[in-house]
Amino acid sequence: MTSISARLEAVRARIAAAASAAGRDPGTVGLLAVSKTWPAEAVREAAAAGQRAFGENYVQEGVDKVEALRALGLEWHFIGPLQSNKTRPVANAFDWVHGIDRLKIAERLSAQRDVHLPALNVCIQVNVSGEDSKSGVAPDEVAALAQAVAALPRLRLRGLMCIPEPTDDTALLRARFAVLRRLRDELVAAGLALDTLSMGMSHDIEPAIADGATHRPGRHGHLRRPRPQDRLSPAHRNGPSTGHPEPMRPAGCCAVWDDCKAQALGLPAGKPRGRSGRYDVANRCFDADHAARRRQPGARRGRRRRRCRACRLRTSTGARSTSSARA
């Protein structure tokens, strides 16, 4: 048994135990495996272990996996925040969208869903904890949004979704989940056919299931992917998580430093990066750990021009920069 299949079995056992303790049929609780940042091969391995539903947060990454694994007949859920300019690929690639928090997004999904595809299953995201940083509609606005979404063609409103604040307080989690369940029951009483409560993560399986969760999102296999800096040699690591301070870099350090990071990321050296690192390696330094980079006193905070301290010192003292040398 592989590590992914073994961890899937462990999660399924937890779900079954929690459902039995709550007096529910374990078959009424589905595991939604969050496959964001995992390669298609890992998803294929999880599918071979019997997992059928997968959740993605990032549009392009998710669409690529859907296309690569289409022959497997998997069920794809988009669970991240969705911008209005990215609704078209989501509308036609995914089977579910869990994060509807405003009518505009639902209207675009409805208009852009292929008429030859089944209706797109959607859930309204509710901000049950009232956090300003959290997406979702306020509880007192759910009813109006639900009625409007339910009336749209090519969409099927299935239920509600929430992500409470992270806490070890089980009573508080139960209270948050109870809000979502109460809202669902009120909508059902108002005539909407809802059957889904998408709530709960790996750390709160038991309280979520006790309060009626039908989809329990969780990172499949419960494996933590190695971070890029974990694959670097100690001399090239930095950031507070590794304990290694930022080393001094030799002349021409930008290209050397970036090539080292590119190798760890599996990217071609000396090429422009994608969205996560669009920096010219001949003039700017790329750090794979954004949080650590922002805390380094020698790093600039701008997104597009981030040069290491040594390079900026050479430039400020009149030395020819690597960019001018290349020119």
Image: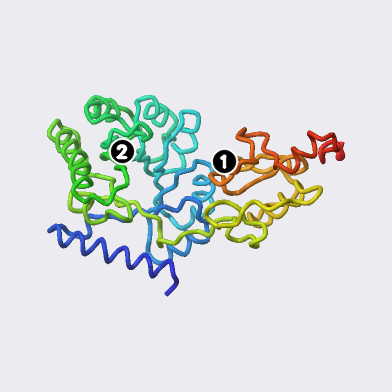
Q: Residue at x 27, y 37 (%)?
A: 129
Q: Extreme bottom residue here?
A: 1
**Residue 124 found in image quarter:** top left
Q: CA distance from mark 2 to mark 1?
A: 36 Å
If you read the primary sequence from the N terminus, does the residue marked by circle 2 or circle 1 appear first?
A: 2
Picture layout, residue 217 above or below residue 120:
below
Asked if the residue under mark 1 is in contact with the one under mark 2, i.e. CB atoms within 8 Å, the reply is no
Q: Which residue is mark 1?
A: 294
Secondary structure at numbered mark 1: helix
- Using the image, tell me which numbered label, if any, was put on residue 314: none
**Is 148 on the left or on the right of 247, as rendered?**
left
**Is 191 on the left or on the right of 110, as rendered?**
left
Q: Residue at x 18, y 53 (%)?
A: 210
Q: Which residue is mark 2?
A: 123
Picture layout, residue 219 above or below residue 45:
above
Dot 1 amino acid type:
Arg
Q: Residue at x 35, y 40 (%)?
A: 98
Residue 71 point in image, percent of width and height: 49, 56
Q: Foreground: 320 or 248?
A: 248
Count of numbered tags: 2
Residue 19 point in image, percent of width and height: 19, 59
The mark lying in front, picked from 2 and 1, is 1
Q: Foreground: 76 or 162?
A: 162
**Residue 285 found in image quarter:** top right
Picture layout, residue 92 above or below residue 230:
above
Secondary structure at numbered mark 2: strand
Report the coloring of the rendering.
rainbow
Dot 2 amino acid type:
Cys
Residue 82 point in image, percent of width and height: 44, 34
Residue 237 point in image, percent of width and height: 62, 56
